[in-house]
């Protein structure tokens, strides 16, 4: 298949591209290599992909409609997976403009390019668990009312879901949105907890642990996420014209277990922990119901922290070793 991935130099885009290339697909990647985090990490992921004959990367900003259209015209994708976005909840407080640019203007351009493309691609796109905002009821289900976002990031992701619905309705395009839940794994984003905890552990710095460590979180291994996406890429028929799916781990894991496995994997015998009370607005547990995606394509996350985190640690040690040299 011909698959266009936006955000291909990003954490999830890189893993998805690698898996599709391994399965023999032709993949075109689009990324603007912005400096939200270490550009060297994005370049290194892209360099891995460029080694594969089925891959070609393009340095394109999805907010640049003409440049994006040129990629569609040349490549004629059958499926588009839009992962390019400005991520991060806290960053949106000081940098709101970039969210409007990438997540709203950029996303509209992706929809417009899909709408006008002769190849009539199906669109899969990244939403986020952050659309659930301050909802306390668990598990999070797709049919919950999520009209009260509590960050600009979440508001743009909810807006994407609405924009996609409109394009499916008006133009008969298939659009499937995925609410990702805290993804971790090798080549991870430096602002994610797994990476920032690992950085602190190896530097001997204390990790702040809220609610005295008594918390459960829905950590999802990146290969499980990729597996769910690939199932939807492959299933051309039988899926609705428009749908939103949770894509998470559905089994919450203890924060303290996560830290213990990380410390062991990184060879840190005595991790420094700074126990703190619960933060206002924080919740004891988060987890997703993934029944809808299971029913649609048989999605079944299989990687517990005890299996996924050691793999992350191996990559992290290797990456840090290269950085020091
Ligand atoms: N990783 C998670 O835990 C998580 C959770 C919820 C949602 N998501 C969503 O999943 C998607 C992928 O996340 P990720 O963790 O791989 O993030 P990432 O930041 O590693 O990847 C996004 C990539 O998109 C690129 N990009 C950003 N704006 C662009 C633009 N205007 N034009 C072209 N490229 C652009 C970035 O350079 C980056 O390489 C994002 O949409 C994110 O919001 C991720």
Image (cartoon, rainbow, N blue to C red):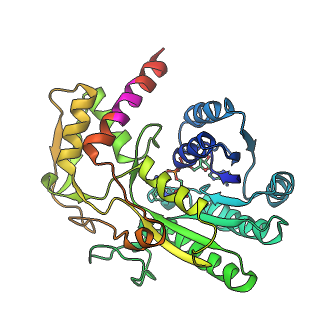
Task: Report the magenta stretch's main SS.
Answer: helix
- Residue drawn where x is 68% and y is 85% of the image: 169
Q: Image check: 111 left or right of 67? A: left
Image coords of residue 74 (percent x, y):
86, 52
Location of residue 96 with respect to 172 vertically, above or below: above
Q: Nearer the viewer, residue 208 or 231?
A: 231
- Determine if the magenta segment contains residue 289: no
Q: Image check: 199 left or right of 188? A: left
**In this orientation, does residue 31 appear?**
no
Image coords of residue 265 (percent x, y):
26, 30
Q: Image check: 2 left or right of 83? A: right
Q: Nearer the viewer, residue 13 or 35?
A: 13
Q: Image check: 44 left or right of 281? A: right
- Residue drawn where x is 42% and y is 72% of the image: 295
Magenta range is 311-317
The number of numbered badges drawn on the structure is: 0
- Residue drawn where x is 54% and y is 76% of the image: 243
- Determine if the magenta segment contains residue 312: yes
Image coords of residue 220 (percent x, y):
37, 53
Location of residue 143 with respect to 38 vertically, above or below: below
């Amino acid at each position: 298949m011909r698959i266009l991935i936006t955000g291909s130099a990003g954490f999830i885009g890189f893993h998805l591209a690698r898996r599709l290339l391994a399965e023999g697909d032709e993949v075109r990647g689009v990324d603007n290599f912005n400096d939200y985090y270490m550009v060297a990490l994005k370049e290194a992921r892209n360099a891995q992909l460029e080694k594969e004959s089925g891959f070609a990367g393009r340095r394109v900003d999805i907010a640049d409609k003409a440049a994006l259209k040129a990629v569609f015209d040349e490549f004629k994708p059958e499926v588009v997976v839009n992962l390019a976005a400005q991520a991060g909840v806290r960053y949106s407080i000081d940098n709101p403009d970039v969210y409007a640019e990438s997540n709203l203007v950029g996303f509209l351009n992706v929809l417009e390019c899909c709408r006008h493309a002769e190849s009539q691609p199906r669109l899969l796109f990244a939403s986020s668990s952050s659309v659930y905002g301050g909802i306390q009821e668990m598990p999070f289900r797709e049919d919950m009312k999520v009209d009260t976002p509590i960050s600009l990031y979440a508001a743009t992701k909810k807006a994407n879901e609405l924009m996609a619905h409109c394009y499916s309705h008006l133009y008969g395009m298939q659009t499937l949105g995925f609410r990702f839940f805290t993804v971790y794994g090798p080549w991870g984003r430096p602002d994610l907890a797994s990476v920032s905890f690992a950085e602190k552990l190896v530097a001997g710095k204390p990790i702040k642990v809220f609610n005295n460590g008594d918390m459960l979180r829905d950590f999802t291994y990146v290969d499980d996420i990729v597996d769910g996406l690939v199932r939807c890429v492959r299933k051309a028929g039988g899926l609705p014209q428009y749908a939103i799916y949770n894509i998470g781990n559905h089994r919450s894991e203890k924060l303290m277990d996560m830290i213990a496995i990380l410390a062991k994997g990184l060879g840190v015998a005595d991790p420094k922990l700074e126990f703190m009370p619960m933060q206002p607005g924080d919740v004891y547990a988060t987890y997703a119901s993934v029944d809808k995606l299971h029913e649609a394509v048989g999605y079944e996350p299989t990687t517990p922290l005890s299996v996924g985190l050691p793999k992350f640690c191996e990559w992290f040690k290797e990456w840090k070793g290269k950085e020091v040299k």
